Image (cartoon, helix red, strand yellow):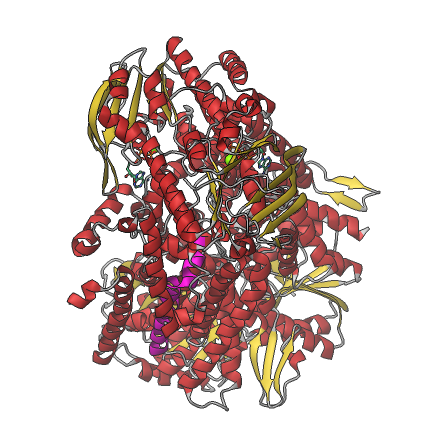
């Protein structure tokens, strides 16, 4: 594991890259649904190449935070700064182009398309040519298609999925679908990757493999990862900093060790600690 | 469609042949039969007109073939009241070997088909496609019915001459060529005749409710309601006028004929309605009586004007063909030329159910006297 | 032979589709030259071509974009009347009929595309059946408006009226091009089978190439999962609109081709029933399956003609056949059977579970 | 004065649309299919009650019952033969089959009852309501239709929201497999839905024919489309929405005709529809389906 | 109680379950473990009647239930909580639970409803909320609660702990044990194999559509190969 660096004064979650500015700065974020305050006064700072975790009981508002970051919902309060840029007024598409990519808690693939096409769609804004060139098959069509095909294969190889390239995404086993979602998100060339329960439906061995891969992704692409997960072996295993949410509010932040021993977190979330 | 008593199915389609009891191929004692094609809507929303023409034609066909001199064979194809389907029907008939065309029943398909018949030199007599465009510029296309032009003008003249009303309201179907055609001619003629048109409203095939149209007519003080429309919407107009307690004189056109024979229709609604129609089912002349009887027997319905048109087309063709010396072995083009000559000659005149002494102009329009009728006690009475 | 095997599956599939159309065209030409083509079939060729283009273009909306449109005939209508007006007014300027046809079709297509944008921009914010009803409404509005539209042409150019042909005030020798409910009458018939064939090929070229390009994938992504598509930076509106407008433009082209094949054309022809008919082609041919659309459009256009011998029962039989075919093509066992047959014919694709929307 | 008279005839027309739309929405809401044959079942209902009253001289109540019985049976048979085999098929396939059924019913009616239209006699012969010294009349059939509409709307809402079978219907409409895992018989539930929908179609047929007394084999087509429009207008799947949508559509149609143009009346109706949908993309009372991400 | 003999299941041409046989005795907790795509869900779906098997037999309490409609299988007392929750998103939380008790008498169902609410207070709190807007874990609770509503004699659970907070995972397994002790037989599919084996009596290990081993839970827990492949760490 990477060496942990002391917490800078303005960061709440430990940062690896003290010298560079953080990739994400969220302050006083909040949203209500009807009467329900789903997220309230949410603050977080994430470093350029940090792997951070967001945990908390069911219904705490974790997925909602992701939805706010990606502008699926517009916040009622607070500000989100991505790489120093305020995302106010942006929509999902613009946020993605600015550098946030995500996976979904309920898998959302383009299920009737092939695995390769799913990734190519992720590469939509990476290898561009206009519609007319596509229809007329001008030289730039061939070039971009070739490049995106190669890139797609390369990305799939992270999870050893090249051999599945031609399979229909919807017919893949659950775990493979989750991995494909990650690959697709990566294809958009993000600065920050949001993973919503990436290990759900995976067995412990697959989870271990996933952990390896998340680290590998961070190292290769030099990006930040924020993940939601209920599998503590994963969270405690790879997250450098963790924030705990309960009833829409952050109740704790810190290193895995700190979180694991935080009584409030144990009470609300972890339950009695078991020996493995 | 109704049930034909004599039907044989040839490869090309439905063929009603000459001698019902003995032959199935249409060639009876008189040698081969002249192949007459028919086109009209047998299914769909306009099916009622096509079926009437077809049925009327079938009755004429039987009679003609029984006469024994010329033999006819009739192949009648459905066009669903659609130009494309009508052309398909026409081509099917051509493949079958059609020599003369009895069709099409309605105007829009006729506008598609008659240019083909003109180009192919197949003589065409349409029973009921009444728009002037049907015959315009086509020397071999003739109409048996009044043209919309004549009807509109005749109606305006009739109203003016007989002083039936001065302030006129019109309700017409603005999605229908027939209705719009008559309306346009009526308006220009009415103006010339000094009639005042106080309200003009429209509807479409989808309209059920005529409150607005009737209220407007009423509010503008119309003393006569001119309805250049078919009898189905007319029956709704009449019943809604009654519900509104709006009493006015109503003047209709030949499309209104049939209203009295509408099954279960409350004929008191139509009491006093005047219309120009060439055919009256309860006329007492021998031919009409015999025709109506046969029609009722075979199809269990009272024939309307369209049935009579179909019947007349067959007879007009028969008489012209006889006069021209047409035989079954002639090509369609030969027949075409001969029939044009007869139809446009001065000494050819035809007496049918829908008029007597009919003659045709070079342009293909018929000239016959419209009969002004008024409905009294549920029956037509001449005006 | 080896080369063909090496091609990508989608490419091979496209080539088969082109091949099918070309083969059919050649057969028809040979029959025509040798005089073996019945008038009935001959007369249906251009309408079939138009319906094929309609079906393929609607498939772009329904199959590829995944939105239900019930007003596709409305775009056909725009193309039809625009085409007729252009062709009639250019009769003296462009004597060459094929060229005039091409110009008319082009204008028809462009106008339909413009209307596609006008309808599409607001409508595409809606989804599912709400979008369907707006397209239906659009079709009805077009029909209603064209029914009361009068267009005339004389030396001073085009004139327009919503009242009557007389109100156009045409000069001597002027021509009423569009006469209200009577529609356009006396059209000079310049559409040809060859033009129909070319249009089909162009349509296929556009649609198939689009499907297998970046934009096509984006359109399919929107169909499969809207939220996920946005999350990877694909603008929903842009690609929805793109598919919708291309589809409308192609329908406009088909409309011009269709209208210029008949002496007369009326607004009523392009009503809800025609939209539905084209939808039937698409669904029967397989949603998203271009080759299927072509075959279904051709077969279902000819079918009622083949049923003429059944007289009164013709349309009843047509309905029954339609229902039975729908049931049969969606039956698991029959589907498996078809799959197995195709597999036997096409061993190479056997282990490829990718069910491409390929043609 | 005219305005009120127009309003009344708008409501009169609209209430007929509403009754049809209720049946549409019911079947759509549960079976998730646009049953384009619904209008034709209405036509059959009209003809059957015609045969019962005009040809067999049966009293109106009996004639309505017969029409309901025939249409309900017809609905069940259609469902069994044409729709059930397509349970697993995409919804568009069912839509096309429904169109096949629609063609079938129209052409069967053409063969049975011929293309000649028939004039229907309203089954509701009591005196129309006269207001303001007879200046305004409300036709008897209008009164019956509005009352029937309200009753049907309330009953359907209660059934769907409160009863066990109604909830089962909703469960089936959302997820057939999951519904089966609850022990809900999917086929039975859908059959019941069609039975109710078709029974309603029979009533709609009687009311439509009583209000606009002419019967033709194609009479159901246009009201069917208008009612579908009304259902969407009100928010498809919403029972009160269908009622509201129907009535509004009728009123807009008549008022548009009266105050804007008779020539463009269809265009006006559909333009208003489009505008409303742009403002309220899920119809007037339609639930905004919030998709949890 | 449940006897599955040599079943083969296909998705089109994909052979997902290859001649599998196993049985579950009354009062047992039996678990199926295996990697992603091994065919566990396919097996449960086949038993529940949602998928057709091409060959083989399935007997429940001595009667063949092969080809029986799924809803009739439920009324025989065999219920399933499917993978991916499959709750009715447009219905309220309470209506979802009511659907769970569809086959039962009203009073019985009401009693069960109270029990479910006791177990999951969060659901009670959200009883009127549209189920589709619940959080993932809340939906999972609802799915389990719904399955409990029918009081089956054999309950099949497909990954019940997925997406649940650790504290709730513990709770779910406690509930499973408790249900079992009160007489419900359970067939459990879990990714969290360690937990599953710790409550189960017996287990079967699946690999690409085949059963590769079966033994008592404690044996499997200590089996090296199993540890390595499925238990991690
Ligand atoms: N669109 C919405 N409308 C109403 N309530 C909502 C909506 N979206 C989320 N909620 C509510 O907000 C709360 C937070 O939901 P969220 O999905 O963020 O939880 P979560 O922390 O991701 O939980 P889990 O771990 O179970 O996935 C939940 O109680 C949920 O019911
Ligand atoms: N609807 C489907 N169409 C095609 N193939 C499918 C389908 N569902 C599952 N499969 C395939 O069947 C095999 C078994 O899948 P199944 O869902 O039963 O596995 P599982 O053991 O439950 O896995 P998981 O742990 O991911 O839930 C997999 O290879 C999967 O790809
Ligand atoms: Mg969540
Ligand atoms: Mg599974």
By secondary structure, the bulk of the magenta-drawn segment is best described as helix
Relative to C252, residue D166 above or below? above
Residue B61's place in the image compared with E43, above or below, is below
User: Ligand 4 lies in which image quarter?
Assistant: top left
Viewer-closest of C72 and B80 = C72
* Residue placed furthest toward the right: D133
Query: In the picture provided, is E225 more to the left or to the right than B160?
Result: left
Give the number of marks: 0
Residue at coordinates 68% horizontally, 57% vertically from top-left?
A: B272
Segment colored magenta: C193-221
Q: Name the residue at the top extreme.
A: E182
Side of A106 relative to E59 (left or right) = right
Q: Position of residue B234 (x, y in %)?
A: 62, 57
State yes or no: residue A169 in magenta.
no
B62 versus A206 height, above or below: below
Q: Position of residue D125 (x, y in %)?
A: 66, 37
Q: Is residue B225 left or right of C9 when viewed as pictured?
A: right
Say which residue appears at 44% left-offset and 44% top-offset.
A108
The quadrant where residue B218 appears: bottom right
Give the image quarter of residue E173: top left
| Residue A17 place in picture, x, y as percent | 51, 48
Quadrant in the picture for residue D238: top right
Residue C319 point in image, percent of width and height:
37, 51
- Kindly tell me whether residue B161 is visible in this rendering: yes
Which of E111 and B280 lies nearest the eye of the viewer? E111
Q: Is residue C277 visible?
A: no
- Vertical placement of residue D133 versus E90, above or below: below
Q: Residue at x 33, y 67 (%)?
A: B74
């Amino acid at each position: 594991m990477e060496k942990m660096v002391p917490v800078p004064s303005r960061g709440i979650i430990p940062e690896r890259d003290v010298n560079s500015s953080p990739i994400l700065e969220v302050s006083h974020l909040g949203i209500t649904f009807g009467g329900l305050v789903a997220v309230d006064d949410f603050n977080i700072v994430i470093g350029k190449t940090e792997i951070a975790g967001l945990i908390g009981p069911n219904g705490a508002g974790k997925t909602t935070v992701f939805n706010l970051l990606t502008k699926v919902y517009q916040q009622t309060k607070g500000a989100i700064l991505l790489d120093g840029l305020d995302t106010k007024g942006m929509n999902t598409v613009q946020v993605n182009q600015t550098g946030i990519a995500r996976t979904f808690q309920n898998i959302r693939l383009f299920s009737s398309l092939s695995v390769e096409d799913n990734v190519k769609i992720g590469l939509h804004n990476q290898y561009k040519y206009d519609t007319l060139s596509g229809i007329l098959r001008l030289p730039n069509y061939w070039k971009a298609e070739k490049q995106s095909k190669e890139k797609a294969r390369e990305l799939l190889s992270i999870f050893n999925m090249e051999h599945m390239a031609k399979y229909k995404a919807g017919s893949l086993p659950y775990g493979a679908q989750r991995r494909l979602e990650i690959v697709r998100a990566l294809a958009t060339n993000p600065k920050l990757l949001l993973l919503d329960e990436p290990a759900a439906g995976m067995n412990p061995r697959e989870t271990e493999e996933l952990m390896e891969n998340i680290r590998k992704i961070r190292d290769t692409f030099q990006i930040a990862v924020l993940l939601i997960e209920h599998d503590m072996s994963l969270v405690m295993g790879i997250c450098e900093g963790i924030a705990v949410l309960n009833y829409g509010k952050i109740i704790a932040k810190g290193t895995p060790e700190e979180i694991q021993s935080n009584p409030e977190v144990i009470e609300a979330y972890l339950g009695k600690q078991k020996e493995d | 469609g109704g049930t034909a008593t004599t039907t044989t199915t040839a490869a090309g389609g439905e063929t009603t042949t000459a001698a019902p009891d003995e032959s199935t191929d249409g060639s009876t004692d008189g040698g081969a039969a002249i192949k007459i094609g028919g086109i009209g809507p047998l299914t769909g929303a306009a099916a009622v007109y096509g079926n009437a023409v077809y049925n009327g034609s079938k009755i004429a066909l039987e009679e003609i073939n029984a006469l024994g001199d010329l033999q006819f064979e009739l192949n009648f194809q459905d066009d669903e009241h659609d130009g494309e389907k009508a052309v398909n029907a026409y081509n099917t008939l051509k493949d079958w070997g059609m020599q003369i065309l009895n069709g099409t029943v309605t105007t829009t398909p006729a506008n598609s088909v008659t240019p083909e018949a003109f180009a192919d030199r197949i003589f065409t007599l349409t029973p009921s496609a009444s728009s002037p465009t049907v015959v315009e510029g086509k020397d071999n296309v003739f109409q048996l019915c009044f043209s919309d032009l004549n009807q509109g003008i005749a109606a305006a003249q009739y109203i003016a001459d007989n002083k039936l009303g001065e302030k006129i309201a019109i309700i017409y179907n603005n999605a229908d060529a027939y209705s719009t055609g008559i309306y346009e001619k009526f308006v220009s003629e009415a103006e010339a005749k000094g009639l005042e048109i106080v309200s003009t409203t429209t509807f479409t095939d989808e309209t059920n409710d005529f409150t607005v149209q009737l209220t407007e007519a009423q509010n503008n003080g119309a003393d006569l309601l001119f309805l250049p429309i078919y009898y189905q919407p007319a029956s709704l107009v009449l019943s809604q006028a009654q519900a509104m307690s709006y009493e006015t004189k109503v003047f209709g056109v030949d499309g209104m004929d049939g209203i009295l024979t509408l099954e279960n229709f409350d004929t008191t609604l139509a009491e006093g309605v005047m219309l120009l129609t060439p055919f009256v089912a309860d006329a007492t002349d021998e031919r009409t009586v015999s025709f109506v009887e046969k029609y009722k027997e075979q199809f269990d319905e009272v024939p309307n004007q369209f049935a009579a048109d179909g019947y007349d087309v067959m007879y007009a063709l028969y008489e012209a063909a006889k006069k021209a010396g047409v035989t079954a072995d002639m090509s369609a083009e030969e027949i075409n030329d001969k029939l044009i000559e007869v139809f446009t000659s001065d000494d050819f005149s035809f007496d049918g159910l829908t008029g007597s002494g009919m003659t045709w102009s070079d342009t293909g329009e018929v000239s016959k006297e419209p009969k002004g009728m008024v409905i009294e006690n549920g029956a037509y009475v001449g005006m | 032979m080896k080369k063909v095997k090496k091609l990508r599956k989608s490419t091979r599939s496209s080539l088969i589709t082109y091949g099918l159309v070309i083969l059919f065209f050649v057969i028809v030409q040979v029959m025509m030259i040798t005089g073996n083509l019945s008038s009935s079939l001959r007369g249906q060729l251009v309408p079939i071509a138009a319906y094929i283009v309609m079906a393929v273009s609607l498939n772009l909306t329904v199959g590829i974009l995944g939105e239900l449109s019930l007003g596709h005939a409305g775009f056909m209508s725009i193309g039809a009347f625009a085409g007729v007006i252009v062709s009639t007014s250019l009769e003296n300027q462009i004597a060459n009929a094929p060229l005039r046809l091409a110009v008319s079709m082009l204008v028809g297509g462009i106008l339909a595309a413009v209307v596609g944008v006008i309808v599409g921009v607001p409508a595409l914010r809606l989804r599912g059946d709400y979008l369907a009803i707006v397209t239906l409404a659009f079709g009805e509005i077009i029909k209603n408006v064209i029914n009361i539209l009068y267009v005339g042409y004389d030396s001073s150019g085009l004139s327009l009226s919503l009242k009557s042909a007389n109100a156009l005030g045409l000069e001597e020798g002027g021509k009423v091009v569009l006469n209200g409910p009577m529609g356009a009458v006396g059209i000079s018939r310049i559409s040809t089978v060859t033009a129909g064939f070319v249009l089909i090929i162009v349509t296929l070229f556009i649609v198939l190439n689009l499907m297998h390009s970046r934009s096509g994938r984006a359109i399919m992504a929107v169909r499969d999962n809207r939220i996920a598509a946005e999350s990877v930076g694909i603008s929903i509106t842009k690609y929805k609109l793109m598919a919708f407008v291309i589809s409308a433009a192609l329908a406009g082209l088909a409309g011009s081709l269709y209208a210029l094949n008949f002496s007369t054309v009326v607004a009523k022809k392009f009503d809800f029933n025609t939209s539905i008919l084209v939808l039937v082609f698409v669904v029967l041919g397989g949603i998203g399956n271009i080759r299927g659309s072509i075959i279904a459009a051709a077969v279902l256009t000819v079918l009622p003609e083949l049923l003429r011998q059944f007289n009164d029962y013709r349309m009843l039989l047509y309905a029954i056949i339609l229902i039975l075919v729908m049931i049969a093509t969606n039956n698991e066992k029959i589907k498996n059977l078809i799959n197995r047959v195709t597999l036997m014919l096409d061993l190479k694709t056997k282990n490829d579970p990718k069910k491409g929307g390929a043609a | 004065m005219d305005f009120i008279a127009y309003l009344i005839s708008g409501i009169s027309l609209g209430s007929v649309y509403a009754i049809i739309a209720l049946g549409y929405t019911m079947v759509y809401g549960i079976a998730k299919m646009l049953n384009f044959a619904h209008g034709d079942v209405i036509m059959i209902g009209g003809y059957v009650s015609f045969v019962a009253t005009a040809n067999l001289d049966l009293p109106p109540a009996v004639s309505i019952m017969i029409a309901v019985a025939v249409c309900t049976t017809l609905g069940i048979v259609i469902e069994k033969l044409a729709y059930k085999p397509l349970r697993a098929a995409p919804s568009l396939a069912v839509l096309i089959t429904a169109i096949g059924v629609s063609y079938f019913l129209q052409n069967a009616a053409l063969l049975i009852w011929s293309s000649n239209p028939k004039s229907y006699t309203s089954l509701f012969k009591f005196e129309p309501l006269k207001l303001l010294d007879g200046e305004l009349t409300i036709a008897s059939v209008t009164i019956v239709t509005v009352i029937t509409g309200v009753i049907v709307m309330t009953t359907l809402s209660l059934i769907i929201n409160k009863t066990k079978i109604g909830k089962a219907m909703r469960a089936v409409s959302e997820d057939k497999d999951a519904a089966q895992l609850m022990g809900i018989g999917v086929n039975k539930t859908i059959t019941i839905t069609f039975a109710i929908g078709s029974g309603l179609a029979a009533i709609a047929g009687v009311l439509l024919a009583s209000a606009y007394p002419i019967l033709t084999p194609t009479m159901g087509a246009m009201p069917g489309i208008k009612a579908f429009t009304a259902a969407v207008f009100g928010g498809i799947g919403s029972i009160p929405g269908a009622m509201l949508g129907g009535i509004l559509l009728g009123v807009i149609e008549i008022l548009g005709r009266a105050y804007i143009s008779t020539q463009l009346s269809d265009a006006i109706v559909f333009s208003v529809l489009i505008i409303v949908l742009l403002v309220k993309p899920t119809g007037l009372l339609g639930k905004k389906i919030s998709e949890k991400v | 109680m449940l006897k599955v003999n040599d079943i083969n299941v296909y998705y089109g041409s994909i052979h997902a379950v290859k001649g599998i046989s196993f049985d579950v005795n009354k009062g047992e907790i039996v678990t199926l473990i295996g990697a992603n795509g091994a065919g566990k869900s396919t097996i449960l779906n086949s038993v529940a009647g949602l998928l057709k098997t091409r060959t083989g037999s399935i007997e429940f309490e001595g009667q063949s239930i092969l080809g029986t409609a799924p809803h009739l299988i439920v009324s025989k007392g065999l219920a399933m909580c499917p993978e991916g929750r499959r709750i009715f998103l447009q219905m309220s939380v309470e209506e979802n639970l009511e659907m769970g008790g569809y086959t039962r008498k009203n009073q019985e169902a009401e009693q069960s409803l109270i029990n479910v609410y006791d177990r999951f207070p969060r659901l009670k709190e959200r009883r009127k909320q549209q189920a589709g807007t619940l959080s993932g874990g809340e939906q999972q609770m609802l799915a389990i609660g719904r399955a409990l509503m029918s009081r089956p004699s054999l309950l099949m659970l497909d990954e019940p702990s997925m997406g649940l907070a650790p504290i709730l995972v513990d709770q779910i397994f406690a509930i499973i044990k408790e249900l079992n002790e009160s007489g419900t037989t359970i067939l459990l599919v879990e990714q969290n194999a360690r937990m599953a084996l710790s409550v189960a009596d017996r287990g079967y290990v699946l690999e690409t559509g085949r059963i590769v081993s079966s033994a008592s839970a404690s044996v499997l827990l200590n089996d090296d190969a199993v540890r390595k492949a499925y238990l991690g760490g």
